[in-house]
Amino acid sequence: MKKIKQIDSVEMFIVRLPLVTPFETSFSVQTLKEVLLLKIISNEAWGWGECVTSPDPYYCYETNKTASHIIQDFLVPILSTMKNFSVEGVLESFEKIRGHWMAKATVENALLDLMARQCQIPLFELIGGEKKKIMSGISIGIKEDINTLLKTIQTACDKRYHRIKIKIKKNKDIKILKKVRRTFPNIKLMADANSDYTLEDLHILKKLDEFDLMMIEQPLNYDDIYFHSLLQHQIQTPVCLDESVKNLNDAKTAAELGSCKIINIKQGRVGGMLNAKKIQAYCRNSGIEAWSGGMLETGIGRAFNLHLQTLPGFVLPGDTSETSRYFDEDIVNRPVILQPDGFIEIPDGTGIGVDVLPERLERYKIFSKRIL
Ligand code: OSB
Ligand code: MG
Protein backbone atom coordinates (compact mmCIF):
# COMPACT_ATOMS: atom_id res chain seq x y z
CA MET A 1 0.00 0.00 0.00
CA LYS A 2 0.94 3.66 -0.34
CA LYS A 3 3.17 5.63 2.04
CA ILE A 4 2.77 8.58 4.37
CA LYS A 5 5.81 10.89 4.67
CA GLN A 6 5.42 11.87 8.29
CA ILE A 7 2.77 13.05 10.73
CA ASP A 8 2.52 16.79 11.33
CA SER A 9 -0.06 16.92 14.09
CA VAL A 10 -2.58 14.86 16.04
CA GLU A 11 -5.62 16.26 17.84
CA MET A 12 -7.90 14.40 20.23
CA PHE A 13 -11.52 15.33 20.97
CA ILE A 14 -14.21 14.08 23.30
CA VAL A 15 -17.69 14.74 21.98
CA ARG A 16 -20.98 14.18 23.80
CA LEU A 17 -24.16 13.62 21.79
CA PRO A 18 -27.59 12.89 23.27
CA LEU A 19 -29.24 9.68 22.03
CA VAL A 20 -32.74 10.00 20.56
CA THR A 21 -33.95 7.11 22.77
CA PRO A 22 -32.12 5.31 25.59
CA PHE A 23 -30.37 2.14 24.39
CA GLU A 24 -30.73 -0.74 26.85
CA THR A 25 -28.68 -3.93 26.69
CA SER A 26 -28.11 -6.70 29.21
CA PHE A 27 -25.13 -4.70 30.50
CA SER A 28 -26.28 -1.04 30.58
CA VAL A 29 -28.76 1.68 29.69
CA GLN A 30 -27.12 4.30 27.52
CA THR A 31 -28.65 7.77 27.11
CA LEU A 32 -25.61 9.60 25.76
CA LYS A 33 -22.85 8.91 23.30
CA GLU A 34 -19.57 10.15 24.69
CA VAL A 35 -16.95 9.46 22.08
CA LEU A 36 -13.23 9.95 21.52
CA LEU A 37 -12.26 11.28 18.08
CA LEU A 38 -8.82 11.65 16.55
CA LYS A 39 -7.71 13.95 13.76
CA ILE A 40 -4.34 13.27 12.16
CA ILE A 41 -2.75 15.75 9.75
CA SER A 42 0.07 15.08 7.28
CA ASN A 43 1.18 17.07 4.29
CA GLU A 44 -2.01 19.16 4.21
CA ALA A 45 -4.28 16.13 4.20
CA TRP A 46 -6.21 15.03 7.25
CA GLY A 47 -7.93 11.90 8.47
CA TRP A 48 -10.49 11.19 11.19
CA GLY A 49 -10.79 8.20 13.47
CA GLU A 50 -13.51 7.38 15.99
CA CYS A 51 -12.85 5.16 18.97
CA VAL A 52 -15.62 2.64 19.77
CA THR A 53 -14.97 2.62 23.52
CA SER A 54 -17.51 3.94 26.03
CA PRO A 55 -16.86 5.90 29.22
CA ASP A 56 -17.49 2.63 31.14
CA PRO A 57 -15.90 -0.87 30.89
CA TYR A 58 -19.23 -2.75 30.66
CA TYR A 59 -18.99 -4.01 27.09
CA CYS A 60 -15.25 -4.68 27.32
CA TYR A 61 -12.23 -3.60 29.37
CA GLU A 62 -11.29 -0.66 27.17
CA THR A 63 -12.79 2.75 28.01
CA ASN A 64 -12.46 6.26 26.61
CA LYS A 65 -9.81 6.90 29.25
CA THR A 66 -7.74 3.77 28.63
CA ALA A 67 -7.91 4.48 24.89
CA SER A 68 -6.86 8.08 25.41
CA HIS A 69 -3.95 6.88 27.58
CA ILE A 70 -2.79 4.24 25.09
CA ILE A 71 -3.14 6.60 22.13
CA GLN A 72 -1.32 9.53 23.79
CA ASP A 73 1.36 7.67 25.69
CA PHE A 74 2.15 4.77 23.35
CA LEU A 75 0.61 4.81 19.87
CA VAL A 76 1.17 8.42 18.85
CA PRO A 77 4.75 8.48 20.23
CA ILE A 78 5.52 5.46 17.99
CA LEU A 79 3.82 7.14 15.05
CA SER A 80 5.75 10.37 15.59
CA THR A 81 9.09 8.61 15.03
CA MET A 82 8.07 7.01 11.72
CA LYS A 83 9.06 8.34 8.29
CA ASN A 84 7.82 7.20 4.88
CA PHE A 85 5.62 4.53 6.33
CA SER A 86 2.66 2.39 5.30
CA VAL A 87 -0.37 1.79 7.52
CA GLU A 88 0.61 -1.89 7.63
CA GLY A 89 4.00 -0.80 8.96
CA VAL A 90 2.32 1.19 11.69
CA LEU A 91 0.24 -1.81 12.73
CA GLU A 92 3.40 -3.90 12.94
CA SER A 93 5.01 -1.34 15.22
CA PHE A 94 1.88 -1.41 17.38
CA GLU A 95 2.17 -5.17 17.88
CA LYS A 96 4.36 -4.86 20.97
CA ILE A 97 1.44 -3.21 22.75
CA ARG A 98 -0.78 -5.96 24.10
CA GLY A 99 -4.49 -5.74 23.39
CA HIS A 100 -6.11 -2.29 23.30
CA TRP A 101 -7.57 -3.07 19.88
CA MET A 102 -10.06 -0.20 20.02
CA ALA A 103 -7.33 2.37 20.69
CA LYS A 104 -5.26 0.91 17.83
CA ALA A 105 -8.26 0.95 15.47
CA THR A 106 -8.76 4.67 16.10
CA VAL A 107 -5.26 5.51 14.89
CA GLU A 108 -5.45 3.03 12.02
CA ASN A 109 -8.78 4.47 10.85
CA ALA A 110 -7.50 8.06 10.89
CA LEU A 111 -4.41 7.02 8.91
CA LEU A 112 -6.47 5.17 6.29
CA ASP A 113 -8.83 8.12 5.86
CA LEU A 114 -5.83 10.42 5.55
CA MET A 115 -4.10 8.19 3.02
CA ALA A 116 -7.23 7.82 0.89
CA ARG A 117 -7.70 11.60 0.91
CA GLN A 118 -4.04 12.07 -0.02
CA CYS A 119 -4.49 9.69 -2.97
CA GLN A 120 -7.85 11.34 -3.75
CA ILE A 121 -9.67 8.04 -3.79
CA PRO A 122 -12.56 6.72 -1.70
CA LEU A 123 -11.62 4.57 1.24
CA PHE A 124 -13.24 1.42 -0.19
CA GLU A 125 -10.88 1.60 -3.16
CA LEU A 126 -7.86 1.91 -0.87
CA ILE A 127 -8.82 -1.24 1.05
CA GLY A 128 -9.66 -3.23 -2.10
CA GLY A 129 -13.44 -3.14 -1.91
CA GLU A 130 -15.96 -2.68 -4.68
CA LYS A 131 -18.57 0.05 -4.75
CA LYS A 132 -21.99 -1.38 -4.00
CA LYS A 133 -25.06 -0.59 -1.97
CA ILE A 134 -24.93 -1.85 1.57
CA MET A 135 -27.61 -3.90 3.32
CA SER A 136 -29.18 -2.35 6.40
CA GLY A 137 -29.92 -3.85 9.79
CA ILE A 138 -31.23 -2.47 13.03
CA SER A 139 -30.33 -3.31 16.62
CA ILE A 140 -33.27 -2.70 18.95
CA GLY A 141 -32.57 -2.32 22.67
CA ILE A 142 -34.50 -3.95 25.50
CA LYS A 143 -37.85 -2.17 25.90
CA GLU A 144 -40.03 -1.50 28.94
CA ASP A 145 -42.92 -3.48 27.52
CA ILE A 146 -43.70 -5.76 24.63
CA ASN A 147 -45.96 -3.31 22.81
CA THR A 148 -43.23 -0.70 22.55
CA LEU A 149 -40.93 -3.38 21.15
CA LEU A 150 -43.51 -4.56 18.60
CA LYS A 151 -44.13 -0.97 17.49
CA THR A 152 -40.42 -0.33 17.09
CA ILE A 153 -40.07 -3.48 14.99
CA GLN A 154 -43.04 -2.44 12.84
CA THR A 155 -41.47 0.96 12.21
CA ALA A 156 -38.21 -0.74 11.19
CA CYS A 157 -40.09 -3.07 8.83
CA ASP A 158 -41.88 -0.09 7.27
CA LYS A 159 -38.47 1.46 6.63
CA ARG A 160 -37.44 -1.79 4.86
CA TYR A 161 -34.60 -2.71 7.19
CA HIS A 162 -33.19 -6.00 5.90
CA ARG A 163 -33.02 -7.65 9.30
CA ILE A 164 -34.04 -7.00 12.86
CA LYS A 165 -31.88 -7.69 15.91
CA ILE A 166 -33.36 -7.46 19.36
CA LYS A 167 -31.43 -7.34 22.59
CA ILE A 168 -32.35 -9.97 25.16
CA LYS A 169 -31.32 -10.78 28.72
CA LYS A 170 -32.32 -13.34 31.32
CA ASN A 171 -36.08 -13.23 31.95
CA LYS A 172 -36.56 -10.94 28.97
CA ASP A 173 -36.08 -13.59 26.35
CA ILE A 174 -38.31 -16.55 25.48
CA LYS A 175 -41.68 -14.96 26.13
CA ILE A 176 -40.68 -11.87 24.19
CA LEU A 177 -39.23 -13.78 21.24
CA LYS A 178 -42.37 -15.93 21.07
CA LYS A 179 -44.55 -12.82 20.81
CA VAL A 180 -42.26 -11.16 18.27
CA ARG A 181 -42.12 -14.25 16.10
CA ARG A 182 -45.89 -14.69 16.23
CA THR A 183 -46.44 -11.09 15.22
CA PHE A 184 -43.75 -11.09 12.52
CA PRO A 185 -43.55 -14.65 11.17
CA ASN A 186 -41.46 -13.73 8.12
CA ILE A 187 -38.85 -11.19 9.20
CA LYS A 188 -35.16 -11.96 9.37
CA LEU A 189 -34.76 -11.95 13.13
CA MET A 190 -31.86 -12.45 15.53
CA ALA A 191 -31.13 -11.84 19.20
CA ASP A 192 -28.11 -10.44 21.04
CA ALA A 193 -27.57 -11.48 24.68
CA ASN A 194 -24.37 -9.53 25.32
CA SER A 195 -22.99 -12.32 27.53
CA ASP A 196 -25.93 -12.62 29.93
CA TYR A 197 -26.06 -16.45 30.06
CA THR A 198 -23.95 -19.38 31.20
CA LEU A 199 -24.14 -23.05 30.28
CA GLU A 200 -26.35 -23.50 33.34
CA ASP A 201 -28.98 -21.74 31.24
CA LEU A 202 -28.72 -24.34 28.48
CA HIS A 203 -32.42 -25.22 28.87
CA ILE A 204 -33.30 -21.59 28.01
CA LEU A 205 -30.85 -21.33 25.13
CA LYS A 206 -32.21 -24.58 23.63
CA LYS A 207 -35.65 -23.00 23.43
CA LEU A 208 -34.30 -20.40 21.01
CA ASP A 209 -34.41 -23.12 18.34
CA GLU A 210 -38.20 -22.66 18.13
CA PHE A 211 -37.98 -19.15 16.70
CA ASP A 212 -36.10 -19.59 13.45
CA LEU A 213 -33.50 -17.01 14.46
CA MET A 214 -30.71 -16.14 12.05
CA MET A 215 -28.42 -16.41 15.07
CA ILE A 216 -27.95 -15.84 18.78
CA GLU A 217 -25.18 -13.30 19.34
CA GLN A 218 -22.72 -13.63 22.23
CA PRO A 219 -24.84 -15.71 24.61
CA LEU A 220 -22.01 -16.62 27.03
CA ASN A 221 -19.15 -14.88 28.79
CA TYR A 222 -17.59 -11.83 27.09
CA ASP A 223 -14.17 -13.44 26.69
CA ASP A 224 -15.19 -17.07 26.32
CA ILE A 225 -14.57 -19.17 23.24
CA TYR A 226 -14.46 -22.69 24.65
CA PHE A 227 -17.87 -22.87 26.36
CA HIS A 228 -19.49 -21.39 23.27
CA SER A 229 -18.23 -24.47 21.41
CA LEU A 230 -20.00 -26.73 23.90
CA LEU A 231 -23.14 -24.65 23.42
CA GLN A 232 -23.02 -24.58 19.62
CA HIS A 233 -22.82 -28.36 19.55
CA GLN A 234 -26.06 -28.58 21.53
CA ILE A 235 -28.29 -26.02 19.81
CA GLN A 236 -29.49 -25.58 16.24
CA THR A 237 -29.53 -21.80 16.28
CA PRO A 238 -26.23 -20.52 14.86
CA VAL A 239 -24.05 -18.91 17.52
CA CYS A 240 -22.50 -15.58 16.54
CA LEU A 241 -19.53 -14.24 18.48
CA ASP A 242 -19.07 -10.52 19.11
CA GLU A 243 -17.25 -9.56 22.36
CA SER A 244 -15.08 -12.72 22.36
CA VAL A 245 -13.36 -12.04 19.03
CA LYS A 246 -10.78 -9.29 19.49
CA ASN A 247 -8.36 -10.36 16.77
CA LEU A 248 -7.61 -12.91 14.06
CA ASN A 249 -6.26 -15.40 16.57
CA ASP A 250 -9.58 -15.42 18.45
CA ALA A 251 -11.43 -15.99 15.16
CA LYS A 252 -9.16 -18.94 14.38
CA THR A 253 -9.65 -20.42 17.84
CA ALA A 254 -13.42 -20.09 17.48
CA ALA A 255 -13.35 -21.76 14.05
CA GLU A 256 -11.12 -24.61 15.23
CA LEU A 257 -13.32 -25.28 18.25
CA GLY A 258 -16.61 -24.89 16.36
CA SER A 259 -17.67 -22.16 18.78
CA CYS A 260 -19.78 -20.26 16.27
CA LYS A 261 -21.08 -20.28 12.72
CA ILE A 262 -21.05 -16.53 12.39
CA ILE A 263 -18.83 -13.66 13.55
CA ASN A 264 -19.86 -10.06 14.11
CA ILE A 265 -16.80 -8.22 12.86
CA LYS A 266 -16.66 -4.73 14.33
CA GLN A 267 -13.64 -3.14 12.73
CA GLY A 268 -13.38 -0.77 15.70
CA ARG A 269 -13.15 -3.74 18.09
CA VAL A 270 -10.53 -5.79 16.20
CA GLY A 271 -7.85 -3.15 15.66
CA GLY A 272 -9.22 -1.53 12.52
CA MET A 273 -10.17 -2.04 8.89
CA LEU A 274 -7.10 -4.05 7.83
CA ASN A 275 -7.46 -6.55 10.67
CA ALA A 276 -11.18 -6.78 9.95
CA LYS A 277 -10.33 -7.57 6.34
CA LYS A 278 -7.98 -10.36 7.43
CA ILE A 279 -10.60 -11.85 9.75
CA GLN A 280 -13.16 -11.61 6.97
CA ALA A 281 -10.88 -13.43 4.54
CA TYR A 282 -10.18 -16.11 7.10
CA CYS A 283 -13.90 -16.56 7.80
CA ARG A 284 -14.65 -16.93 4.12
CA ASN A 285 -12.10 -19.72 3.82
CA SER A 286 -13.34 -21.58 6.86
CA GLY A 287 -17.09 -21.56 6.30
CA ILE A 288 -17.91 -18.91 8.88
CA GLU A 289 -20.29 -16.17 7.84
CA ALA A 290 -19.54 -12.59 8.80
CA TRP A 291 -21.25 -9.27 9.12
CA SER A 292 -20.28 -5.80 10.19
CA GLY A 293 -21.45 -4.74 13.62
CA GLY A 294 -21.71 -1.31 15.12
CA MET A 295 -21.12 0.53 18.39
CA LEU A 296 -23.60 3.40 18.09
CA GLU A 297 -20.97 5.29 16.13
CA THR A 298 -21.29 8.87 14.95
CA GLY A 299 -21.08 9.53 11.23
CA ILE A 300 -17.33 9.01 11.25
CA GLY A 301 -17.34 5.44 12.56
CA ARG A 302 -20.50 4.66 10.63
CA ALA A 303 -18.73 5.64 7.38
CA PHE A 304 -15.85 3.25 8.12
CA ASN A 305 -18.34 0.43 8.76
CA LEU A 306 -20.02 1.15 5.41
CA HIS A 307 -16.75 1.10 3.47
CA LEU A 308 -15.76 -2.15 5.20
CA GLN A 309 -18.85 -3.86 3.82
CA THR A 310 -17.72 -3.31 0.23
CA LEU A 311 -15.27 -6.19 0.78
CA PRO A 312 -16.37 -9.57 -0.55
CA GLY A 313 -17.85 -11.83 2.07
CA PHE A 314 -19.96 -9.44 4.09
CA VAL A 315 -22.90 -11.58 3.10
CA LEU A 316 -25.24 -10.86 5.99
CA PRO A 317 -26.87 -7.54 6.82
CA GLY A 318 -25.03 -5.83 9.67
CA ASP A 319 -25.88 -3.39 12.43
CA THR A 320 -25.92 -0.63 9.85
CA SER A 321 -28.77 1.71 10.52
CA GLU A 322 -29.76 5.28 9.85
CA THR A 323 -28.13 8.09 11.78
CA SER A 324 -31.55 9.49 12.78
CA ARG A 325 -32.24 6.36 14.77
CA TYR A 326 -29.58 7.40 17.28
CA PHE A 327 -28.97 11.14 16.86
CA ASP A 328 -31.06 14.17 16.02
CA GLU A 329 -27.95 15.85 14.78
CA ASP A 330 -24.67 14.19 13.83
CA ILE A 331 -21.26 15.85 13.66
CA VAL A 332 -20.77 15.06 9.96
CA ASN A 333 -22.25 16.60 6.83
CA ARG A 334 -23.82 13.44 5.39
CA PRO A 335 -25.98 11.39 7.73
CA VAL A 336 -26.67 7.74 6.83
CA ILE A 337 -30.08 7.44 5.19
CA LEU A 338 -31.99 4.35 4.07
CA GLN A 339 -33.08 4.21 0.44
CA PRO A 340 -36.68 3.12 -0.26
CA ASP A 341 -35.40 -0.45 -0.80
CA GLY A 342 -33.66 -0.44 2.59
CA PHE A 343 -30.16 -0.24 1.12
CA ILE A 344 -27.53 2.36 2.03
CA GLU A 345 -25.27 4.15 -0.44
CA ILE A 346 -21.55 4.52 0.18
CA PRO A 347 -20.91 8.25 0.64
CA ASP A 348 -19.26 9.71 -2.47
CA GLY A 349 -15.96 11.52 -2.29
CA THR A 350 -12.43 10.85 -1.14
CA GLY A 351 -11.50 9.16 2.14
CA ILE A 352 -14.49 8.09 4.21
CA GLY A 353 -16.65 10.44 2.14
CA VAL A 354 -18.07 12.42 5.04
CA ASP A 355 -16.70 15.60 6.60
CA VAL A 356 -16.85 16.77 10.17
CA LEU A 357 -18.81 20.03 10.47
CA PRO A 358 -16.67 22.46 12.51
CA GLU A 359 -19.66 24.20 14.15
CA ARG A 360 -21.20 20.86 15.21
CA LEU A 361 -17.88 19.70 16.59
CA GLU A 362 -17.67 22.93 18.55
CA ARG A 363 -21.23 22.53 19.88
CA TYR A 364 -20.87 18.97 21.14
CA LYS A 365 -17.20 18.91 22.14
CA ILE A 366 -16.47 18.61 25.86
CA PHE A 367 -12.68 18.29 25.58
CA SER A 368 -9.93 18.69 23.02
CA LYS A 369 -6.18 18.55 23.11
CA ARG A 370 -3.35 18.59 20.62
CA ILE A 371 -1.25 15.52 21.42
CA LEU A 372 1.39 15.93 18.73
O1 OSB B 1 -23.42 -5.85 21.21
O2 OSB B 1 -23.58 -5.29 19.19
C1 OSB B 1 -23.53 -4.98 20.38
C2 OSB B 1 -24.10 -1.23 20.75
C3 OSB B 1 -23.17 -0.94 21.74
C4 OSB B 1 -22.42 -1.95 22.28
C5 OSB B 1 -22.59 -3.26 21.84
C6 OSB B 1 -23.50 -3.55 20.84
C7 OSB B 1 -24.29 -2.52 20.32
C8 OSB B 1 -25.35 -2.73 19.33
C9 OSB B 1 -25.75 -1.57 18.47
O3 OSB B 1 -25.96 -3.76 19.22
C10 OSB B 1 -25.10 -1.56 17.15
C11 OSB B 1 -25.34 -0.29 16.37
O4 OSB B 1 -26.44 -0.08 15.89
O5 OSB B 1 -24.39 0.49 16.22
MG1 MG C 1 -23.31 -7.68 20.13
Image (cartoon, rainbow, N blue to C red):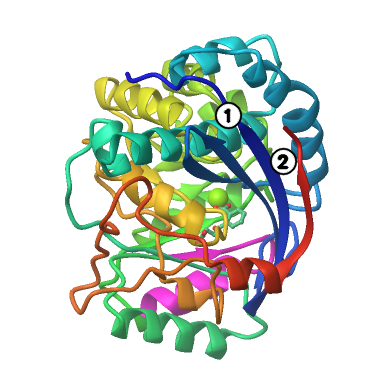
The residue sitting at 36% across, 45% down in the picture is 351
Q: Is residue 31 left or right of residue 242?
A: right
Horizontal and vertical percent for residue 12? 71, 46
Picture layout, residue 213 above or below residue 88? below
Residue under label 2:
60
Q: Which mark is residue 246?
A: 1
Q: Is residue 102 above or below residue 166?
A: above
Q: Position of residue 250 (x, y in %)?
A: 54, 21
Few, some or many residues within 10 Å of mark 2 (<14, 14–19, 20+): some
Between residue 72 and residue 80, name the one nearer to us: 80
Find out whether residue 230 is within the magenta segment: no
Q: Residue at x 46, y 13 (%)?
A: 84
Q: Quadrant of residue 63?
A: top right
Q: Is residue 217 above or below residue 221?
A: below
Mark 1 residue crowding within 10 angstroms, few (<14) / some (14–19) / many (20+): many
Horizontal and vertical percent position of residue 313: 24, 36
Q: Is residue 313 visible?
A: no
Residue 370 tag number: none
Please, what secondary structure does the residue beneath circle 2 have?
A: loop
In magenta, the rendered stretch is 165-182
Indicate the amino acid at tag 1.
Lys
Q: Amino acid at mark 2?
A: Cys
